Image (spheres, grey):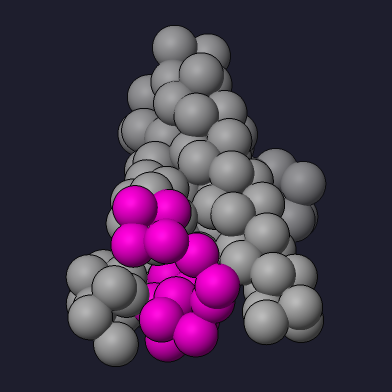
Amino acid sequence: MSSGRLNIIAGGVAIVLAGLGGFALGFTMGPYFEKGFYAIPLGRVLLKAGHTHGLPIAFYNIIIGSLLDRLTLSDKWKKICSIFTILSFIMPVGLLLRGITDGAMTFAPVVLIGSLCFFISALIMVKGAISNQTA
């Protein structure tokens, strides 16, 4: 499990951080619900989106980290897949940055970069899994 060790560590740390962020958001949501769900400001919605995207990406890192050594990929491609999977965390970080800046579009490209890293890592993983069928 050496190829995916860093992914498992990053996933575990992200679960803790996203969980703490969820607690913070949950304890401070009361005033927004009094006005109605649609009265929540965009910045707050983006902070919530950062939290809710961070957890699945954390679990994705743990899954990829656990499976990476079982895939039919060269060591180079396993490392590339691992790096792109970790870089997927750029997406929730970009959402958090947009939330902190009240929805400024300045950080929208950051979200896109993280999404592309997620997509590339998934493509590499699928390639390695399909290659396993023929091995």
Which sits in the foreground, 5 or 61?
A: 5
Q: Position of residue 127 (x, y in %)?
A: 68, 60
Which sits in the foreground, 11 or 1?
A: 1
Identity of the residue furthest to the front in this view = 135
Start-end of magenta stretch: 61-77
Q: Quadrant of the N terminus?
A: bottom left
**Image-quadrant location for residue 21:** bottom left
Which sits in the foreground, 51 or 85?
A: 85
In percent of the image, x 36 and y 33: which residue is there? 97
In percent of the image, x 76 and y 78: which residue is there? 134
| 63 is within the stretch colored magenta | yes
Answer above or below: position of 7 versus 8.
above
Q: Quadrant of the C terminus?
A: bottom right
Q: Is residue 13 left or right of residue 47?
A: left
Q: How many marks?
A: 0
Q: Is residue 130 left or right of residue 50?
A: right
**Image-quadrant location for residue 58:** bottom left
Q: Position of residue 85 (x, y in %)?
A: 44, 56
Answer above or below: position of 78 versus 64.
above
**Image-quadrant location for residue 72:** bottom right
In percent of the image, x 61 and y 67: which residue is there? 128
Which sits in the foreground, 71 or 98?
A: 71
Q: Position of residue 10 (x, y in %)?
A: 26, 69
Q: Position of residue 86 (x, y in %)?
A: 35, 55
Q: Is residue 68 left or right of residue 83?
A: right
Q: Is residue 97 left or right of residue 10?
A: right
Principal SS element in the magenta part?
A: helix
Residue 93 in view (yes/no): yes
Residue 26 in view (yes/no): no
